[in-house]
Amino acid sequence: MRDNRATRLLFQVAAILFALIVTTGVLFLAKAQPFAAYKYIVLGALGSWDVVTNVLVSWVPLLLATSGLLVTFTVGLWNIGIEGQITLGAIFTTWAMRLMEQSGWNPTLILILAVLAGMLGGALWAMLAGALKTFGGVNEIFGGLGLNFVATALNIWLIFGPWKRPGVASMSGTIPFDRSLWMPIAQGSSRLTPATLVMAIIGILVVYAMIEGTYFGLRLKAVGKNARSAHILGIPTWQYMMSSFAVCGIFAGVAGAVQVTAVYHRLIPSISSGYGYLGLMVAMLVGYRASLAAPVALFFAALNVGSIQLPIVLKLDSSLAGVLQGTLVLFVILGQGVRSRILKKTKVKS
Amino acid sequence: MNNSALFVSLGGVLASAAPVLFAVIGETISERAGVLNLSMNGMILLSAMGSFAVALSTGSVVLGFLAGALIGAFVSLIVVFASLTLLQSQVAVGFVLALLCRDLSYFLGSPIMGQVGPRLSQLPIPGLERIPVLGTILFQQDMMTYLSFILVIFAWFFIFKTRPGLTLRGIGERPAAAFVRGTNVNRLRYLYAILGGAIAGLAGPIYSLSVKAGWKGTISGLDGIGWIVLSITIFGGWKPFRAAFGAYLFAFLQWLGLVLQPSLPSVPSQVLQVAPFPLMILTLLFVNIGNAEWVERSLARLPENVRRDIAKVLRAMNATPPAALGVPFEKE
């Protein structure tokens, strides 16, 4: 077997097939009709202009999270703490909005400042994980996980404590912002906000240009490939790790700000919606390369939105989307392993 | 709260620590062999759901526990196959499985949500249960809680006092040296990772058939336990007794959160439930800080007697992971 684009494609197609076979098996196990389930997922994601805009709404934060993660993956870091960074971005955004709500300033200015505050929140939380890693020797996976739980606790405390609705605090979140302070919604749509779409697209382009086209990106790659030799070559390793955490935190913060200003218009307990973990999956699926991140994130967002209707129409849990996404990533990873094993064997023979 | 109620609750703390203990000891064995099993969070959920489903349909608690162990072993098998045979990242595969197994458990478990099924019965030990105080705390438990006590002692004895235990530590610390001495490193890693997975898989049925009987989907309160287990494994320094201390500390703090709830009405219950997590980060920091380079450098500048005392404290808290943790072993 040769190492070329065709064989790589072959293995990717095989991974998709295996993922479909396993998910179909799971559906049979749940005594459901697989084809009906797939049909409703497709209809739920593409059936009308309204659901298509819902896919785009969920694509924005997912792509933002993935973009940030590509930077930390480039330097070889597993930023599992991104969920907390999204949450902190949302908290800082809400905080800024609450401060400026009554100021009478131009709504556009308020929204810009609120997104900047979100960036700050995400970056601070990410750098905390970075500091634990560089100065405390705490592995970024475990530090990040712990910080995720702390972020959730902080968020819930704010919703039930200082920022609670007048009267009774509830899981439905803080009191919504005034309509004038919502991210502007496109005409003829109920939820689509063009400004956030632009943010996400610019975001992935910036990450692509930064990793592939700048000296900074080249050095990030060097640290990621071999931190020790990069250090010997004179690259200040830990500063680069910290910067990549900060950049990822900024992206996560924007994702949180989008959730608050454009999707929920308030702070809710599960404000990160799992986009951080899903972003990790997307980044793994695209092999940590920026070029494919946007379409794959769109596909994952479509699966999520498409499965929302499943409990109503088929009495199936909507976690089916996660099953399909998880098996897909798993088989792509296994496929890579099988492929490189076969390649090695053919090399030894020849 | 009067004294006897307190002793019953302390007994409850031991029971609620039992699943965490099984999971932590399982992960410790796996990591001692050099295999980091990051799938823990999803694996516990899937084994909790799967074992409850099996016990519900067969009426047998024993078969439920068996199913839990099998699920744990199977998930670990995927991790080791991907990492040891196919040389893919252990962290990546483990993380994907953590999410995949969680979603699988929610998807497949939704039809049996909220149903009442068989559960493990209490098994007071005749005679011993009548000992004042200790009897109430220690000897009015169910089978798995007693087994959790024995498991810790057994794991410690096996890892540190037996010949196979020495080999187990060897393949996690210096696989090349173990290989030269004729050990089949990868075969043993398969064995211990799967064994560790099976032990950790029992945590699921201990929840769904005893401590939190039943399956309640996303509100089971089990999501997150697996991540805690991974932190406690580090906190435990890959030593069974220290790990057990971590598990009991965690269970105690969660119980304390529940007890303090009425006296702190302004703090929502969800906040108190996660109170152990920040403490976990702090302990991880303490456990790891002795490994950081700058600490050593700044220690060197201190006067001799102060330095020796601080170094002693740091060393007591310190834990160094098995040297070859997460690194695949290749003969070439």
Image (cartoon, coloured by chain):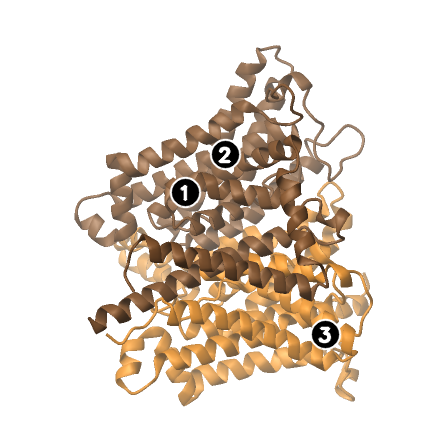
Q: Chain of mark 2?
A: A
Q: Residues within 10 Å of mark 3 (few under 14, many from 20)?
A: many
Residue under numbered circle 1: A292
The verdict on a common chain for dots 2 and 3 is no
> What amino acid is labelled 1 in the image?
Leu
Q: Colour of chain B?
A: orange
Colour that chain A carries in the picture: brown
Along the polypeptide, which appears first: circle 2 or circle 1? 2
Subunit ID for the residue under disc 1: A
> Gap between marks 2 and 3, in whole Å?
43 Å
Q: Secondary structure at mark 2?
A: helix
Q: Nearer the viewer, residue B291 or B218?
A: B218
| Residue type marked 2 | Gly
In the rendered image, residue B242, in percent from the top left (x then y), is placed at 51, 70
**Residue under pointer 2:** A253
How far across and how far down the image is residue B320, in percent? 38, 66
**Which element type, helix, strand or loop, lies under badge 1?**
helix
Q: Residue at x 43, y 59 (%)?
A: A333
Hey, what amino acid is under mark 3?
Answer: Val
Instruction: Left or right? Give the position of A317 relative to B163.
Output: right
Residue B225 appears in the rendering: no
Image coords of residue A44 (percent x, y): 66, 42
Query: Where residue B54 is drawn, which disc sits there?
Result: 3
Same chain for mark 1 and mark 3? The answer is no
Quarter of the figure with residue A184: top right
Question: Is residue A62 in view?
Answer: yes
